[in-house]
Amino acid sequence: MVKKNTNEILHKLDFIDDADDETILIALKSNIPDYKMAYLLNRHLSVRFEKATDDISLTTDTGVAYFRTFAFQDTKNHLVWRLLENKSNHSENITEQPYSLFTNENTLFTATNYLVNEWKNIDFFILIENADLFFNPEELLEKLQDIKNLSTHFLVDWDSLSIKTQKNLIF
């Protein structure tokens, strides 16, 4: 009788560690509207940003701030691209007492909120999720130089952002 070795390896499973995948954040400064920025990025970067159906909403001390966003799912490279508006101007009518002698019905309260508080002077961010070692952000920055309406653009160090800001950027 032949005894079979039960310690023999029949199949080996490879564990693919996605911990090497990173999130890339690029800051964009420009005075053009968000839809024009999406159009220019589509043209120069060969991406296809589309307006997301839901805006990003953040609850703040002054109410709820909404930030417009555009998204592109790159299925070929397994990347998720997002164009995020950094600045939200929120206005609402304030009437503490409806029939007070000292309140004006046309009183507007305006609050400016930022998605990334550390960079209040930046208008937009490009957020690229699932970037691996083969993705070259420097090549992307070179392509962005061709867009005339951008006054500045640069790579943001993800670790330099506060934890609260990082949570705002996780979708």
Image (cartoon, rainbow, N blue to C red):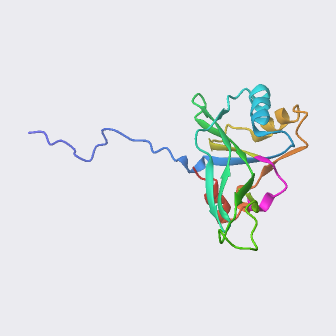
Which quadrant of the structure image shows residue 159? bottom right
Q: Residue at x 66, y 68 (%)?
A: 61
Q: Is residue 7 in the magenta section? A: no
The residue range painted magenta reads: 116-124
Where is residue 88 shown, x and y percent of the image? 73, 53
Q: Residue at x 56, y 51 (%)?
A: 19
Q: Residue at x 87, y 33 (%)?
A: 147
Tally of marks: 0
Screen quadrant of the N terminus: top left
Q: Residue furthest left?
A: 1
Say which of 89 and 164 sits in front: 89
Left/right placement of residue 21 relative to residue 150 reads left
Relative to 152, residue 139 above or below: above
Relative to 151, residue 60 above or below: below
Where is residue 167 shown, x and y percent of the image? 61, 59
Which quadrant of the structure image shows residue 37? top right
Which quadrant of the structure image shows residue 76? top right
Say which of 108 and 57 sits in front: 108
Say which of 69 and 138 sits in front: 69
Left/right placement of residue 101 relative to residue 98 reads right
Where is residue 105 shown, x and y percent of the image? 73, 62
Where is residue 68 shown, x and y percent of the image? 68, 45
